[in-house]
Image (tube, helix red, strand yellow):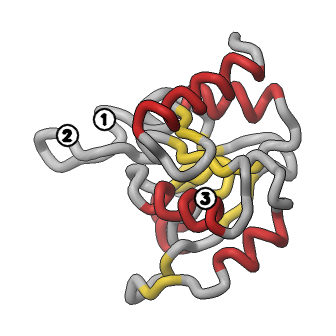
Amino acid sequence: MSTLEQLYAQAHKRRAEHQLTYAGAISPAEAFELLQLDSRVRLVDVRTRAELDWVGRPVVGDGQYAHIEWTRYPGGVPNPEFIDQLRQVASPGTPVLFLCRSAARSKLAAVAAAQAGFTEAYDLLEGFEGGKDGQGHRKTVEGWCYRGLPWIGA
C-alpha cells in the first residue's frame, strides 16, 4: 500500500507530464487506496442516472461517494447546476476524484471544477467501465470494474 504523499505525488506528476489544468490524474487502484487512506476524499461519479441504474457504481467509504451528472439523460444536455451541486458535497480544498464511464467526461468535470476554484480536482483514469475491447465490450481491458475494485451491479 502506498502513502498519501506517494499517491498525490504520482497524480501531480501526471499533471506535469500531460500539462493538465487540474490537480492531477489517478489510476483506479490509486483512487481506491486514496479513498481508504483519506476520509476527506470524495469520489464524484459524473455519469448519468441511467448509467448507474443499468451498469452499477463503485463501493467506497461512507460519505465518500456522490453522484452528480455532467450531462443529463436523456438528451445529453449539459448539467448547468454541476458546480453548485459539487459545492454541496465538497469544499474547494477537498480532494475530489471525478469518475465517468471511460475517463472522458471526468476530465471535463475536473477542468470545470478547477476553473471554479477546486484546487484538488483529479481525473480518475480509465473510468468505471474502461475503453472497448476488439468486440466493442467494456469492463474487459481497463477501468474500475476490470481492476477488481468493489462495485455494485445494477
At mark 1, the secondary structure is loop
The 10 Å Cα crowd at callout 1, few under 14, some 14 to 19, many 20 or more, is: some
Q: Is residue 47 above or below residue 63?
A: below
Real-space Cα separation, disc 3 to disc 1, in angstroms = 20 Å
Real-space Cα separation, disc 3 to disc 2, in angstroms = 23 Å
In screen coordinates, is 92 left or right of 30? right
In screen coordinates, is 32 left or right of 142? right
The type of residue carrying mark 3 is Asp
At horizontal 42% and vertical 50% (from top left) the residue drawn is 103
- Measuring from the top left, give residue 30's x and y in whole percent: 61, 26
The type of residue carrying mark 1 is Thr
Dots 1 and 2: beta carbons under 8 Å? Answer: yes
Q: Tell me the residue that label 3 is attached to.
A: 45
Q: Quadrant of residue 101?
A: bottom left
Q: Tell me the residue that label 1 is attached to.
A: 140
- Nearer to us in this view, 38 or 154: 38
Q: Quadrant of the N terminus?
A: top right
- Measuring from the top left, give residue 39's x and y in whole percent: 87, 38
Q: Tell me the residue that label 2 is attached to.
A: 133
Real-space Cα separation, disc 1 to disc 2, in angstroms = 6 Å
- State which tag comes first along the sequence, 3 or 1: 3
